[in-house]
Image: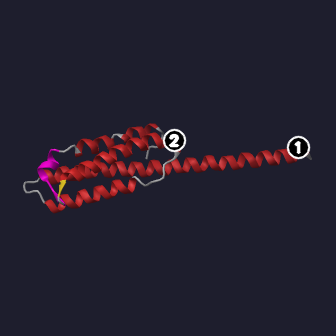
């Protein structure tokens, strides 16, 4: 009888600890998916801004809209839940996000976009730095 109770107790403990592992795995996969989507969006924004700036007559309204969307996307990503396994990568992404937000704020003068300053800014290098984290996400085994 003691063996049965012991086995039942042991099974319960293993089951409960297994649920935590499954939850952490699910959280990690969710984070990887959200981060991959975010990095892809960042790449798209970089291409959009570059295209807008390479047009003959730069449409300032389109550039403003794109930068506002970019800023909102960054701020939304900064709020996601991070599993323990990805804290280091997430901290690095957040640092680059802050740099990107600073560049966007510097580009805006009195609420208006300074096109020359945008062309000469580090926005594209910063976006490229952020998208380079895709390799680290893939190395963690979170390929999407």
Residue depicted at x 43% and y 44%: 90
| Residue farthest left in this picture | 56
| Disc ID at residue 3 | 1
Tell me how far mark 1 sits from mark 2, CA to CA.
37 Å
Q: Position of residue 124 (x, y in %)?
A: 23, 44
Q: Position of residue 102 (x, y in %)?
A: 27, 49
Magenta stretch holds residue 115: yes
Label 1: state its secondary structure: helix
Neighbourhood count class around disc 2 (C-alpha, 10 Å): few under 14, some 14–19, many 20 upward: few
Q: Position of residue 48 (x, y in %)?
A: 22, 53
**Which picture quadrant has residue 125?**
top left
105 to the left or right of 96 = left
Label 2: state its secondary structure: helix
71 to the left or right of 64 = right
Task: Please name whichever residue, 70 or 44, is drawn nearer the observer in this view of the structure.
Answer: 70
| Disc ID at residue 85 | 2
Neighbourhood count class around disc 1 (C-alpha, 10 Å): few under 14, some 14–19, many 20 upward: few
In terms of sequence position, does the residue under pointer 1 or pointer 2 come before the other? 1
Which span is picked out in magenta? 111-120
Task: Please name whichever residue, 73 or 52, is drawn nearer the observer in this view of the structure.
Answer: 73
């Amino acid at each position: 009888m003691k063996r049965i109770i012991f086995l039942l107790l042991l099974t319960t403990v293993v089951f409960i600890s297994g649920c935590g592992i499954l939850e952490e795995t699910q959280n990690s996969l969710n984070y990887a998916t959200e981060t991959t989507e975010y990095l892809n969006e960042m790449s798209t924004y970089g291409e959009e801004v570059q295209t807008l700036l390479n047009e003959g007559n730069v449409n300032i309204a389109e550039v403003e809209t794109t930068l506002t969307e970019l800023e909102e996307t960054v701020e939304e990503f900064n709020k996601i839940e991070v599993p323990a396994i990805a804290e280091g990568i997430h901290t690095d992404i957040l640092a680059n996000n802050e740099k990107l937000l600073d560049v966007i704020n510097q580009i805006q003068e009195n609420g208006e976009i300074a096109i020359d300053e945008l062309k000469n800014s580090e926005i594209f290098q910063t976006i490229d730095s952020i998208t380079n984290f895709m390799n680290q996400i893939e190395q963690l085994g979170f390929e999407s």
